[in-house]
Image (cartoon, grey):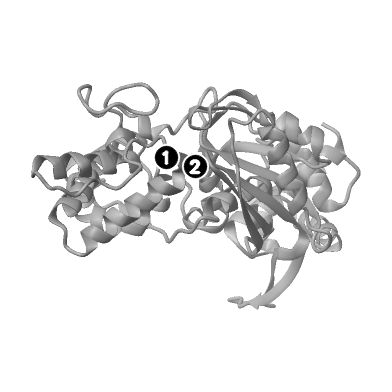
Amino acid sequence: MAATDRGDLTRTAILALLGTGGPLSRTEIARELDLSPATVTQLTRELMGHGMLEELDLKPSRGGRPAVLLGLVGGAGRALGVKVTADHLVLVDVRLDGEVLGSWEQPFDPSAPDALDELAAAVESAVPADGPPLLGVGVGVPGSVEDQAVGTVNAPTLGWQAMPVGERLRRRLPLPVLVENDVNALAVAERLYGRGRTHRDFLVVTIGRGVGAAIVADGRVYRGARGGAGEFGHLPVDPEGPMCGCGARGCLEAFVGSAGLLSAAHAKTADRGDARAAPDGRDGHGDGRDLLGAVAALGRAAAAGDAVARRVFEEAGAVLGRATAGLINVVDPEVVVVLGEGTADWPLWQDGFERALRAQLYPGRRDISIEVESWDDTSWAQGAAALVLATPFDAAGAAGEQGRLVRARLIGATP
């Protein structure tokens, strides 16, 4: 390997260390990366010259001079993140340090013949005219992506089969483009800015219209052989259970996804002879916002004391808890982070979830922490932006050629 290539990898390793671990002194960087102090001094001087690192406060020392801490410059770069759904797009503009500079939303029809052109046009309209350099575009999709740097998408929810999202966007945009499963993208954001800064092995579980999971092992998202790891919503629960949108019967998502909750509410009201109909959208095939709005109405009814609505959430929580316990028993994470639109009603899920989870956990894992984070509609898109923002911190080069282009833009080099 050429000396220049080794230097680029070492600079990336320094950025990775500071990006995921926070500010450190030069001595700590040298120790963590097994580099000589002279090498660290030279490379950090270069990174500071490029405006990527800055000196922060002094760190007290047990003896001798206090150490100067080095940290990332948040304004050294930015990325656009796009969340693709079955009926709309959410776009965000995010700085290297995770600060959201702006967000946009617009209707979107993934089944339209010109859907990818519409997606590209939406990104073009969001490209900033000034400010920190734009490093690239991250796209989060509710499906599998074999290689995020290539970006070919299989997403039944969108009606996409082998859709060349990355190729088409790169043809239209003079920018690096990374495409990934939306839950994996959230896990990348957690690794950069959330619980993952203090945990190298954790699970992200999402609840909402669908159900998903991302597995982070030794600080990296596990993607599987074809990029499809984490389809937690299609874990078989009951072969006699309701039909799932994937075409199988009795998947986890059919019980605890938004459509499953509404179907359960409809069945229970019918059983008790209640004249009131279940909220619209229970079949899960209508507009996504109508579906989520109907679940929100069910949540309000439960919070107001409706016994049937409360039982729906409690039973769904128990099903999710048992399934999550199985995942924990297999993967053995340090912590589980719960995200997604469904967390707005988490107090209604919690009792059923906790009882079922703790009862099914393997001895020694029953004290695992379940962290439920706040949520808004831009969170998915922030995860997509994190695909790009994490690339300079990826010493292993998982983003391939697109990652190299992102790093080149960050240091102002010619690709």
Position of the C terminus, as image quadrant, is top right
Q: Are marks 2 and 1 in contact (CB under 8 Å)?
A: yes
Within-10-Å neighbours for mark 1: few <14, some 14–19, many 20+ = many
Which x, y percent locates residue 8? 80, 44
**Disc sitting over residue 111 in the figure:** none
Within-10-Å neighbours for mark 2: few <14, some 14–19, many 20+ = many
Q: Looking at the image, which is closer to me, 101 or 105? A: 105
On the image, numbered disc 2 is attached to which residue?
A: 183
Which x, y percent locates residue 385? 64, 50
Q: Is residue 362 visible?
A: no
Left or right: residue 62 versus residue 334 is right
Q: Residue furthest front?
A: 275
Q: Residue at x 68, y 42 (%)?
A: 395
Q: Residue furthest left?
A: 272
Left or right: residue 106 versus residue 245 is right
Residue type for callout 1: Ala
Position of the N terminus, as image quadrant, is top right
- N-terminal of the pair, mark 2 or mark 1, is 2
Q: Is residue 285 above or below residue 59?
A: above
Q: Looking at the image, which is closer to me, 139 or 88? A: 88
**Disc sitting over residue 213 in the figure:** 1
